[in-house]
Amino acid sequence: MGARTDLEQSVMRTILWFSQFSSPLTVFEIWKWLLQPERAYGLTEIYTILERSPWLQEKLESHNGFFALKRSGVQKLVEGRQERFLDAERKFRVLRRAAHYFSLLPGVRSVAAGNTLAWWSTTKDSDIDLYIVTRPGHIWSSRFWLVVPFLLLGRRPSRGGSSLDPFCFSFFSTTQYLNFEELCLPRDYYMAFWVRSLVPIFDRDGNLVTLQSENRWVSRSLPNAHPRVSHHRHIPRRVLRIPLQWKFAEPFFRSIQRNRLPDHLRELANLDSRVVVTDDVLKFHDNDRREKYRDTFESLLERHL
């Protein structure tokens, strides 16, 4: 067998990345999420290489149009993915109802679903993970008025995991901070996928569009991964806004939230990109798995490539 082509290796890299999440891929998804190719290949080229490459045929198996590593149990993986899709669709219905409240806050400019929800790959125990864009000078008050109602209703993540569909408000940034390259780890594949997979719920000023153009570095790893656009089903109807946010009150909201930060978040704050606490970014990912995913992926590359 001759040397493996760049396209064969790129297809394999893509399959290996998603194998970490027990997620088989369609041909279109392999094309869209093609990881680190030398150039942007066409969809027809993906179909052709899957049909004609003896090496890929030896490495992969398919079921109902989905591809996964051989001997990974692709049929069960497809069934699991379908179950997770149905749970995510239910969570999106919950999120769409909640978005009517989000849209009442004048400081909240954009809301997007991220992580497993953005991939339609959740279980009943999964959080509804959100990324929020706020006006400058309104990040702390926005977080306060978003978190408090869900806290009172028992719809926040808890260690016991007893809440159904808890809302996780763990990543905020202002409209002035939409480029996340400085938050990346070395070889941060996860952040690249995260940026391109965000699902807009509403986007008042086009900030999520700006975010995608600001993060052009993503295209170096994912040249075919065009950002998702707003879907009419997700956009809440226009309603009056509640005058709960004034810039002069921001120090008050900052003070009470900083004082209530758990000790482990205080210790991690601004040490690295896991927990960031500033007036432009609030990122509370103390259980940041990006490094783990990267190391597991690179171990898979060594084994299969």
Image: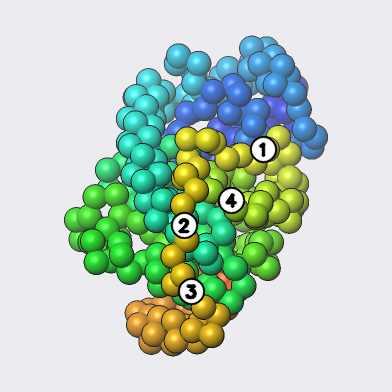
The color scheme shown is rainbow
> Image point 39% across, 41% down: which residue?
92
Q: Return the residue at label 3.
A: 245
- Which one is earlier in the sequence, the residue at label 2 or at label 1? 1
Please, is residue 66 above or below residue 277 in the view?
Answer: above
Q: Return the residue at label 4.
A: 203
Image spot of residue 104 (x, y percent): 45, 59
Q: Is residue 32 visible?
A: yes
Calculate the distance from the C-alpha at mark 3 to the C-alpha at mark 1: 36 Å
Residue nearest the viewer, comparing 23 with 168 = 168
- Which one is earlier in the sequence, the residue at label 3 or at label 2? 2
* Snapshot quadrant of residue 184: bottom right
Badge 4: residue crowd in 10 Å (few <14, some 14–19, many ≥20): many
Instruction: Please state, as top left, top right, bottom left or bottom right, where the C terminus lies in the image.
Output: top right
Q: Return the residue at label 2.
A: 240
Badge 1: residue crowd in 10 Å (few <14, some 14–19, many ≥20): many
Residue nearest the viewer, comparing 98 with 194 = 98
- Which one is earlier in the sequence, the residue at label 4 or at label 2? 4
- Kindly indicate whether the residue at mark 1 contacts the one at mark 3 (C-beta within 8 angstroms): no
Mark 2 or 1, closer to the camera: 2
Calculate the distance from the C-alpha at mark 3 to the C-alpha at mark 4: 19 Å
Residue type for callout 3: Gln
- Which one is earlier in the sequence, the residue at label 1 or at label 4? 4
Mark 4 or 2, closer to the camera: 2
Please, is residue 53 above or below residue 203 in the view?
Answer: above
Q: Return the residue at label 1.
A: 225
Q: Is residue 273 visible?
A: no
Image spot of residue 146 (x, y percent): 40, 65
Badge 2: residue crowd in 10 Å (few <14, some 14–19, many ≥20): few
Calculate the distance from the C-alpha at mark 3 to the C-alpha at mark 2: 14 Å
Residue type for callout 1: Ala
Residue type for callout 2: Leu
